[in-house]
Amino acid sequence: MDLREMEVASKVKALYKEKNPTFANLLKHKPIYLSILPLPTMRGDFPSIQIPEAGFLREVERYKYSLIGRLDLLKVKLVVVRFEALSKWNLSGNCQYIPLGKGYFTILLDNEVDKMRIWGGGPWHIDGQLLRVNI
């Protein structure tokens, strides 16, 4: 199992009858093969693992069109941000929002045209706030 499988756990909720399944319950029936996990080592006083190159390159490819957004998410919910932003951007591809904490979130896009439309088309105001976008 890799991190990408864990990220889509929310999409799996529909398969379960429980009203509020826990993260552990969502992954309970998935086998975890310890032989494919990287072995931890120590680098100085800190534990570390080596990320396999194929997995690293797969994620670099996945995030190559992403942007980082910043808003005060105490004043506006991410659902509202998503709805307003998508209505203003008129994207041709898919768009996913991944919260990072402290008001930051990843805007995961699947093509360069949409990335450049958002990056170069601003300023973008969402619910009265200026959306700051970085590459």
Image (cartoon, helix red, strand yellow):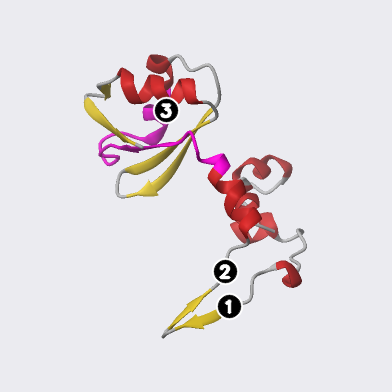
Horizontal side of 32 relative to 4 (left or right) equals right
Quarter of the rendering containing residue 50: bottom right
Q: Earlier in the sequence, mark 1 or mark 2?
A: 1
Near-viewer residue (46 or 8): 46
Q: Where is residue 85 shown, x and y percent of the image?
A: 38, 22
Quarter of the rendering containing residue 55: bottom right
Horizontal side of 69 relative to 24 (left or right) equals left
Residue 82: image tag: 3
Dot 3 falls on a residue whose secondary structure is helix
Tell me if I can see residue 84 in this picture.
no
In the image, the segment drawn in magenta is: 61-85
135 in relation to 121, above or below: below
67 in relation to 42, above or below: above
Q: Earlier in the sequence, mark 2 or mark 3?
A: 2
Q: Amino acid at mark 3?
A: Arg
Dot in front, 1 or 2: 2
Q: Quadrant of the N terminus?
A: bottom right
Near-viewer residue (6 or 66): 66
- Residue for badge 2: 50
Rounded to the nearest angstrom, the CA distance separating label 1 from label 2 is 8 Å
Horizontal side of 30 relative to 102 (left or right) equals right
Q: Amino acid at mark 2?
A: Gln
Judge the density around disc 1: few (<14), some (14-19), many (≥20) Cα neighbours within 10 Å: few
Residue 40: image tag: 1
Tell me if I can see residue 76 in this picture.
yes
Rounded to the nearest angstrom, the CA distance separating label 2 from label 3 is 35 Å
50 in relation to 58, above or below: below
Q: Where is residue 40 shown, x and y percent of the image?
A: 58, 78
